[in-house]
Amino acid sequence: MMALRSVLAEILEPAARLLPARMDSTAARVMLLAIGQQESRFEFRRQLGNGPARGLWQFERGTRASRGGVWGVFLHEQSRGYLEVLCRARRVNFEPDAIWSALERDDILAACVARLLLWTDPKPLPSIDDVAGAWDLYAVRTWRPGKPHPQTWAGYHLASRGALGVLA
């Protein structure tokens, strides 16, 4: 498991520089750290059991029809333009299969795609101490995991706030 401070310094900081400044906030970083822990414990870049998810934030490819996973971020009007610029910067072909494949080896790209998925949600990010609101954003509105584990969420959320020094 990668230490949260390392994730911040080596992944989230460089990712934040690739996206518009308005996408970077303490609330966004809390969400990204909590989701990364929940999805992969910042350890697995390929879903266990040979599943379809890739990257530390465990994105599935999805389909054009389902608009889930990478396809969802690729097609969404709020994220598509940013994703295209990001792909150019990371030297990844701007097409869902190439993006999905790259997530497994490019943690910075994965962090940016995760932030873009949060960006597509029409509601504002929950406040940093709103554990239930953060769970709703993650589990109900954006990632929608097939096998959610709500029992681990509060601990991951608290650890994320601690890594950022914002234990409110």
Image: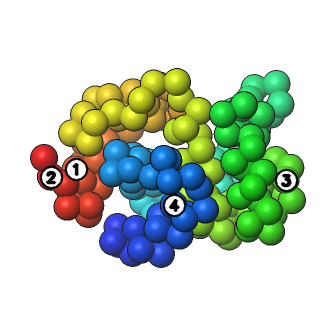
Q: CA distance from mark 2 to mark 4?
A: 22 Å
User: For the residue labelled by badge 3, is the local secondary structure a helix, a strand or a loop?
Assistant: loop
Sequence order check: which comes first, mark 2 or mark 4?
4
Q: Give the mark nearer the N terminus: 1 vs 4.
A: 4
Q: Which residue lies under the disc numbered 1?
A: 158
Q: How far apart are the two marked residues, 1 and 3, measured between alpha carbons?
A: 35 Å
In the picture provided, is 75 more to the left or to the right than 24? right
Q: 47 or 155: which is nearer to us?
A: 155
Is label 4 in contact with label 3 (beta carbons under 8 Å)?
no
> In the shown orientation, is residue 166 left or right of residue 69?
left
Amino acid type, label 3: Phe
Tell us which disc is closer to us: 1 or 2.
Answer: 2
Direction left: furthest residue? 168
SS class, disc 2: loop
How far separated are the C-alphas under marks 1 and 2?
7 Å
Structural distance between the alpha carbons of marks 4 and 3: 20 Å
* Number of residues whose C-alpha sits closer than 10 Å to that of mark 3, classed few (under 14), some (14–19) or many (20 or more): some
Question: Mark 3 or mark 2, which has the lower sequence index?
Answer: 3
Residue at left 54%, top 65%? 17
Pinpoint residue 106: horizontal percent, then vertical percent.
Answer: 66, 68
Local SS, label 4: helix
Residue identified by numbered label 2: 167
* Residue type marked 4: Ala
Residue at the spot 59% in from the left edge and 33% down from the top edge: 120
Check residue 94 in the rendering and tell me which mark sits there, or answer none: 3
Q: Dot 2: within a 10 Å radius of its alpha carbon, few (fewer than 14), some, or many (20 or more) residues?
A: few
The residue that disc 4 covers is: 16
- Badge 4 crowding class, 10 Å Cα cut-off, few under 14, some 14 to 19, many 20 or more, is many
Residue at position x 75%, y 26% in the image = 66
